[in-house]
Amino acid sequence: MNVQESPSSDNHSTNDPQKVGAHDITTRPLSELERHAKETLASALPPDHWEQLRDLAVGRMQRGSDTTEVRIRWGHLALSTILKGQQEHAEKDPKVTVAEAAWIRAYMIQAFGPSDTDPTRQPSELCNEVLLHIGMSRADVARTADTWTTAPRETILQLRRIKNMLSPLLQIEDLLHRDEKVDQEIHQWLALVPRLP
């Protein structure tokens, strides 16, 4: 039997999503947490609240006792909390956010299959998002990868963030080969991952 939401969570329900605090997110129904993430301004709560909600959502997304539909909803909730964190930290390198989201999206594609109707589960969309944020040509990355041990700290950090964005795609690489919508350049990028710090 699949457990969609904890029955006890309904006892703690509130109509005000802003009242969902970090101490009680684990007891709230999924529908309430979805509403909370949608209606609450990122700045209304501390960043660690969105991180805790993301961690909860990622864990529930991977929980095999729930139905696929419910697990996908948890995945979408996790992605929305990542965006909340990015809104709160405008100074944060977008590569970090893209990498965090890429891990979740790659998991969703692998676990639940690609979807023509859900952009978060479209391999080509995920690849395009990663390629858009790399910020360097493949030739420059390859050249820098050969000498990264002597590169400045900022260059090493940039290469590491590129690796973090690309690495989730390795989980679904076989699927990428079969998807005609995927830019085949992505495979040349993925071949660089083992060379990056």
Image (cartoon, rainbow, N blue to C red):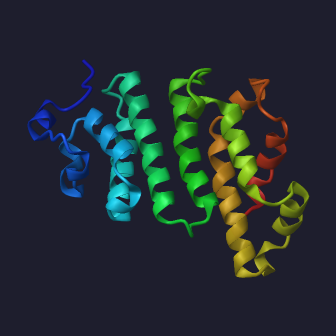
* 83 to 15, vertically: above or below: below
Q: Residue at x 86, y 57 (%)?
A: 137
Q: Locate the C terminus and report the quarter of the image it occupies.
A: bottom right
Residue in view at x 83 percent, y 62 percent: 141
- Residue 197 seen in this snapshot: no
Residue 45 locus on image (x, y percent): 32, 61
Residue at the top extreme of this rendering:
1
**In the rendered view, would you say 15 is above or below 65?**
below
| Percent of width and height locating residue 55 | 37, 50
Quadrant of image for the N terminus: top left
The residue at the point 30 percent across, 44 percent down is 36
- Residue at left offset 67%, top offset 42%: 170
**Residue 61 location, x and y as percent?**
39, 36
Q: Quadrant of residue 135?
A: bottom right
Q: Is residue 102 left or right of residue 83?
A: right
Q: Quadrant of residue 85?
A: bottom left
Q: Quadrant of residue 117?
A: top right
Residue 30 lies left or right of residue 47; in this view the side is: left
Is residue 103 visible to us here? Answer: yes
**37 or 25: nearer the eye?**
37
> Is residue 40 shown left or right of residue 9?
right
Extreme residue toward the left, this view: 11
Q: Position of residue 165 (x, y in %)?
A: 65, 52
Q: Is residue 131 above or below residue 61?
A: below
The number of callouts visible is: 0
